[in-house]
Image (spheres, grey):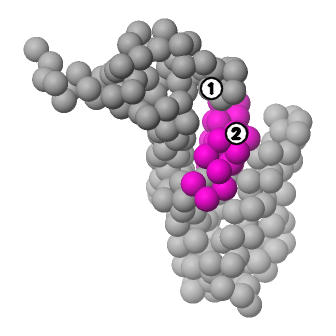
Amino acid sequence: MATNAQRRAQTRGCLINAARHLFAEQGYADTSTETILSGAGVTRGAMYHHFRNKAELFEAVCDLLSREAMAAIEKAVAGQRGSLATLKAGSLAWVDFMARDDVRRILVVEAPSVLGQERWRALDERYSFPLLREGIREAMEEGALHFSGSAEGLAVLLNGAMNALVLNDPWAENLPRLRQDLLALFDCFSGETP
């Protein structure tokens, strides 16, 4: 028999899972609370026990997707040799994850306006941005990347470039070329020729 904590966790998971699929298919604005409740199979009271409103539920979905992105990055960099190879593999894994239709719509297209810039940036700072910054710092310390500015500054610039890359339309047909362009950008800072 499930404990109260297990039932609460299951209800929360059902809400997040249903909302994730609905936000990806219909978008935040066109997804009603009633549709989420129906999809999750829970009552309005159960939802409000876990989330103050639909926006807070959306943020929980964004948090889950951000953690999944971290897992994809960690898997991609496992076994890589050298800081530059690790940085490239992690960056490509981030791009590939963010370029998925469901993730792109929720985390890249809608999250900045639904969450607001400050909360959206805080989400990025909590998860993937520190990996990018640390990867750049390590590559600069090893001499694999050459940049007269700071690792923080280069991380901000590359993070913006990667977000813009994922927003590029039509992204699906351009993604292979854009991935190559991202690698070429890293090579500009490494002294390697693409």
Quadrant the N terminus occupies: top left
Residue stretch rendered in magenta on the structure: 93-119
Residue at 50% across, 56% down: 127
Using the image, tell me which numbered label, if any, was put on residue 110: 2
- Where's residue 161, x and y in %? 78, 61
Residue at 74% across, 56% down: 162
Quadrant the C terminus occupies: bottom right
Circle 1 is placed at which residue position? 23
Residue at 82% across, 74% down: 188
Q: Amino acid at mark 1?
A: Phe
- Mark 1 and 2 residues: CB-CB less than 8 Å, in contact? yes
In front: 123, or 181? 123
Q: In terms of secondary structure, what is the magenta stretch mainly?
A: helix
- As drawn, is 123 to the left or to the right of 169? left
Quadrant in the rendering for residue 48: top left
Q: Amino acid at mark 2?
A: Glu
Taking the image as drawn, is residue 89 in sight?
A: no
- Where's residue 15, x and y in %? 43, 23
Residue at 74% across, 77% down: 190
Using the image, tell me which numbered label, if any, was put on residue 122: none
Q: Up-down: is 98 above or below 46?
A: below
Tag 2 or tag 1, which sits nearer the N-term? 1
Q: Up-down: is 139 above or below 180?
A: below
Is 111 a magenta residue?
A: yes
